[in-house]
Image (spheres, rainbow, N blue to C red):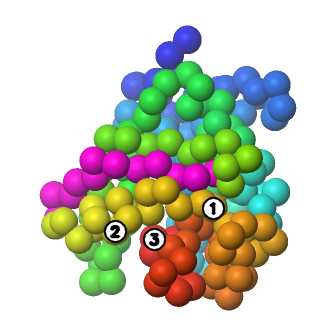
């Protein structure tokens, strides 16, 4: 069955490993990550990122939660279909921005969740799209596992770190 967020606020996915999981939708987009509350830190273990986690904020809506869906559930979704990626964010001056990529995939655990992104564009300039595209081919690291675990530990967040620019998380 083709999973789609069209006209839905949530999807339910049945996983042999994780049971039934609820996934949030926004418009036609499936949400796998939201970092809404700046007080809440994303410094979690490799296992937490594999399995996913959620923090319910103080707001009254589901939009007040911060979460990571989990690499293993994302793997199941990639078995069903290909996905595009959209990254929504607010820049340092408080302006809303977004980048869309026509290619998006995360490899299995034995490849350290290598990220594939490509054909990225932004209506707000090429720098933002180039930043996301520069993550292509990088492997995931958390403070306790991964090629760049020192970067994850020192930055206080797991991510796809670029080894050639030091320990700077480009988008998290």
Q: Residue at x 56, y 45 (%)?
A: 106
Q: Nearer the viewer, mark 3 or mark 2?
A: 2
In which quadrant of the rendered view does residue 151 lie? Answer: bottom right
**Residue 50 shown left or right of residue 31 in the figure:** right
Looking at the image, is mark 3 or mark 2 earlier in the sequence? 2
For label 2, count other residues whose C-alpha is less than 10 Å away and answer few (under 14), some (14-19) or many (20+): some
User: In the rendered view, would you say 36 is above or below 17?
Assistant: below
Q: Circle 3 — which element? A: loop
Magenta range? 113-124
Q: Earlier in the sequence, mark 1 or mark 3?
A: 1
Residue beneath disc 2: 131
Residue 157, image x, y percentages: 65, 75
In the rendered image, residue 126 lying in the magenta stretch gets the answer no
Reading the image, the residue beneath label 1 is 140
Task: Residue 52: tell me if it is visible.
Answer: no
Mark 2 secondary-structure assignment: helix
Q: How far is the residue under mark 1 from the one under mark 3?
A: 13 Å
Q: Are marks 3 and 2 in contact (CB under 8 Å)?
A: yes
Q: Are marks 2 and 1 in contact (CB under 8 Å)?
A: no
Q: Quadrant of the N terminus?
A: top right
Q: Nearer the viewer, residue 77 or 30?
A: 77
Alpha carbons under labels 3 and 2: distance apart: 8 Å
């Amino acid at each position: 069955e083709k999973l789609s967020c069209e006209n839905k606020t949530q999807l339910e996915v049945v996983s042999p490993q994780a049971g039934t999981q609820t996934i949030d939708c926004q418009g036609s987009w499936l949400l796998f990550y939201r970092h809404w509350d700046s007080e809440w830190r994303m410094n979690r273990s490799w296992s937490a990122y594999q399995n996913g986690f959620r923090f319910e904020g103080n707001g009254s809506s589901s939009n007040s939660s911060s979460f990571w869906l989990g690499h293993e559930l994302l793997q199941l979704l990639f078995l069903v279909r290909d996905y595009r990626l959209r990254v929504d964010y607010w820049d340092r001056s408080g302006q809303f921005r977004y980048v869309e990529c026509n290619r998006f995939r995360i490899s299995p655990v034995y490849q350290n969740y290598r990220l594939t992104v490509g054909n990225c564009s932004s209506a707000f300039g090429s720098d933002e799209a180039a930043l996301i595209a520069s993550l292509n081919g990088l492997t995931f690291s958390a403070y306790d596992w991964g090629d760049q675990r020192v970067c994850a530990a020192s930055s206080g967040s797991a991510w796809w770190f670029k080894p050639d620019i030091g320990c700077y998380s480009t988008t998290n």
